[in-house]
Image (cartoon, rainbow, N blue to C red):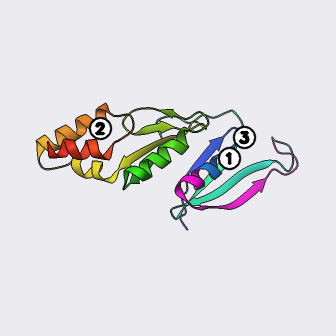
Amino acid sequence: MHKISPFLWYNDDAEQAAELYISIFGGSIVEKRHWGPGGPSPEGSLQSVTFEIDGREYQAFNGGPGQKFTEAVSMFVTVDTQQELDAAWSKLLEGGGQPLACGWIKDRFGLDWQLVPSILSELMVSPDREVSGRVIKVMLDSIKFDFAEIRAAAEG
């Protein structure tokens, strides 16, 4: 178990967020905690959910409307196939998610995600400046990445 885990503040939908992320990336709910007497929310209501994805635990907290996510922090996901990217992209858009730019998407809870093809990272640092330049241009012009377009740019 890691001693450091991401702590994600939600208004009152931490469990729904955790369930969405698990449905996309696999994993499980590890623990649910409920407010006791004297808390800021009704006794017995859900306080937090600990969930696990890809061997890492995350804390999702129902803290009320006091805090919002910003683009300064995002979840970076490396994908190996177009099918994997398309499936995650579609699910993150459900219920009000927004596509942004360069593979970024904001889910309906306001959390930003980067869905990045594994080939993109490799090709962007190609020792061939022409290849890396073409690939970077495709990256900058993209909303959702297309593996075929990236490969075509690399091949010239």
Q: Are the residues at dot 3 and dot 2 in contact (C-beta closer than 8 Å)?
A: no
Q: Residue 84 versus residue 141: which sits nearer the camera?
A: 84
As helix, strand or loop, the secondary structure at mark 1 comes to helix
Is residue 41 toward the left or the right of residue 142 in the image? right
Compare residues 23 and 11 and report the one nearer the observer.
23
Residue 78, label in figure:
none
Residue at 52% across / 56% down in the picture?
Answer: 25
Q: Earlier in the sequence, mark 2 or mark 1?
A: 1
Residue kind at label 1, given as amino acid type? Gln
Task: Point out the frontmost of discs 3 and 2.
Answer: 2
The amino acid type of the residue labelled 3 equals Asp
- The C terminus lies in quadrant: top left
Q: Which residues are magenta?
A: 21-40
Name which residue lies at 28% across and 45% down.
148
Q: Position of residue 47 (x, y in %)?
A: 75, 49
Is residue 124 visible from the viewing direction of this image?
no
Residue neighbourhood size for the residue with mark 3, other residues' Cα within 10 Å, grouped as few (<14), some (14–19), many (≥20): some
Q: Is residue 36 above or below residue 28?
A: above
User: Which quadrant of the structure image shows residue 80?
Assistant: bottom left
Q: Is residue 56 magenta?
A: no
Please state, as top left, top right, bottom left or bottom right, where the N terminus lies in the image. Answer: bottom right
- Kindly identify which residue carries mark 2: 139
Between the residue at mark 1 and the residue at mark 3, the CA separation in whole angstroms equals 9 Å
Mark 3 lies on residue: 12
Residue 26 sits inside the magenta stretch:
yes
Residue located beneath label 1 in the image: 16
Residue at the image position 69 percent from the left and 54 percent from the top: 49
